[in-house]
């Protein structure tokens, strides 16, 4: 008997996609002078993935522009990150306008990051045995969520295929299990978020330690048999490592309400956004929508459209 084909949920990291599109595309404007490159890129990526995966469900997450629990526990969290230009933030409203037009639910929660909301939704979806979750993001923080029902779609550069990460792909890339990705980041830190990690421990050393001792706690339980400069680095960085692990671990119980019926999606719904795309002069996106709407084309894996 053939295994039942699972339905798919596309869980979109809105902040990640908008930032990626803004930096990947030239700063083109409409005839009225409105900058729209991030809006165009966001919907180009989204249309590509929806056309390819034909999801039965979809939801979009965003950060809230306020401090999170991580900022409250660690005053220097993301303190070294350069503020994005206002021209990027100005395009968020247009992206959300399109999502509302499409009827796509938006999830965001004050005090938490979009990644925490993603982790919570992915956790809730595990009770739905016939649904697989595909997280559309350029952020590797979500690698810790990958399992036999949860996957990462990493948007590719123009002209190449999206990268889909399952447990095997992550192991091939890092030599680690998805369960070890939290400890991996806790050891090596994350300069973009100002997560300290253990000073002097890079990617190769972190991988080597986790291959041998499995977990961060396992490393420190065996610290007495680790010699030389590495021992000194780990001993000195013990507090930072344990604190970093707390900071990089995503929350799986953000207080959100998830009604499966409210995140249902039909490809035909994309027709609703055509008037907005006409106003924004996204002629190529309109052509793509109209090209696939009548046929509901499922693209062959070997013939995926480029993102832009």
Image (cartoon, helix red, strand yellow):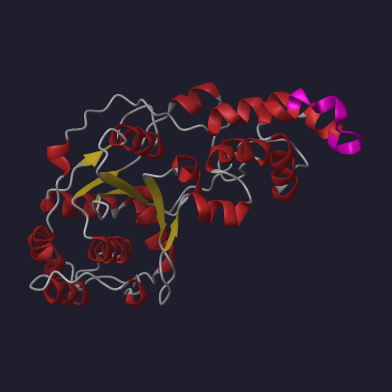
Please state which of residues 180 and 40 is positioned toward the viewer in this rendering: 180
Please state which of residues 259 and 138 is positioned toward the viewer in this rendering: 259
All told, the count of numbered labels is 0
Residue 231 rendering spot, x and y as whole percentages: 85, 32
Q: Residue at horizontal 22%, vertical 55%?
A: 55
Is the residue 112 above or below the residue 147 in the image? above
Q: Is residue 60 magenta?
A: no
Q: Which of the 4 image quadrants contains residue 188?
A: top right
Which image quadrant: the N terminus?
bottom left
Left/right placement of residue 55 relative to residue 88 reads left
Residue 265 rendering spot, x and y as whole percentages: 14, 51
Left/right placement of residue 308 relative to residue 177 reads left
Is the residue 266 above or below the residue 125 in the image? below
Q: Is residue 228 magenta?
A: yes
Left/right placement of residue 99 relative to residue 42 reads left
Residue span colored magenta: 220-230
Residue 166 rendering spot, x and y as whole percentages: 45, 52
Which image quadrant: the C terminus?
bottom left
Q: Residue at horizontal 28%, vertical 70%?
A: 29
Residue 259 rendering spot, x and y as whole percentages: 17, 33
Determine the main secondary structure of the stretch shown in magenta: helix
Q: Residue at horizontal 62%, vertical 52%?
A: 174
Given the current orientation, which residue lies at the most extreme right position?
Answer: 228
Please state which of residues 40 and 36 is positioned toward the viewer in this rendering: 40
Q: Residue at horizontal 11%, vertical 70%?
A: 293
């Amino acid at each position: 008997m053939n295994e039942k084909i699972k339905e798919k949920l596309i869980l979109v990291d809105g902040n990640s996609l908008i930032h990626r599109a803004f930096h990947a595309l030239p700063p083109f404007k409409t005839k009225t002078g409105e900058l729209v490159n991030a809006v165009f890129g966001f919907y180009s990526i989204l249309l590509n993935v929806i056309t390819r995966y034909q999801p039965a469900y979809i939801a979009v997450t965003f950060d809230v522009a306020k401090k999170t629990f991580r900022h409250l526990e660690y005053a220097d969290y993301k303190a070294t990150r350069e503020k994005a230009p206002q021209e990027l933030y100005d395009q968020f409203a247009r992206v959300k306008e399109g999502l509302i037009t499409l009827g796509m639910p938006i999830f965001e929660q004050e005090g938490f990051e979009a990644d925490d909301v993603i982790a919570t939704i992915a956790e809730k979806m595990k009770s739905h045995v016939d649904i697989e979750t595909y997280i559309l993001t350029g952020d590797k923080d979500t690698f810790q969520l990958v399992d036999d029902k949860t996957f990462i779609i990493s948007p590719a550069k123009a002209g190449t295929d999206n990268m889909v990460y399952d447990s095997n792909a992550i192991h091939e890339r890092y030599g680690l299990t998805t369960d070890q990705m939290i400890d991996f980041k806790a050891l090596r830190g994350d300069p973009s978020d100002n997560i300290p990690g253990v000073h002097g421990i890079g990617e190769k050393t972190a991988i080597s330690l986790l291959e041998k001792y499995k977990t961060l706690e396992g490393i420190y339980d065996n610290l007495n048999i680790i010699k030389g400069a590495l021992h000194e680095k780990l001993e000195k960085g013990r507090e930072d490592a344990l604190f970093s692990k707390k900071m990089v671990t995503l929350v799986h119980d953000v207080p959100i309400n998830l009604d499966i019926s409210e995140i249902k999606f039909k490809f035909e719904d994309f027709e609703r956004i055509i008037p907005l795309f006409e106003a924004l002069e996204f002629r190529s996106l309109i052509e793509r929508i109209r090209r696939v709407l009548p046929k509901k084309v499922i693209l062959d894996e070997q013939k995926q459209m480029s993102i832009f």
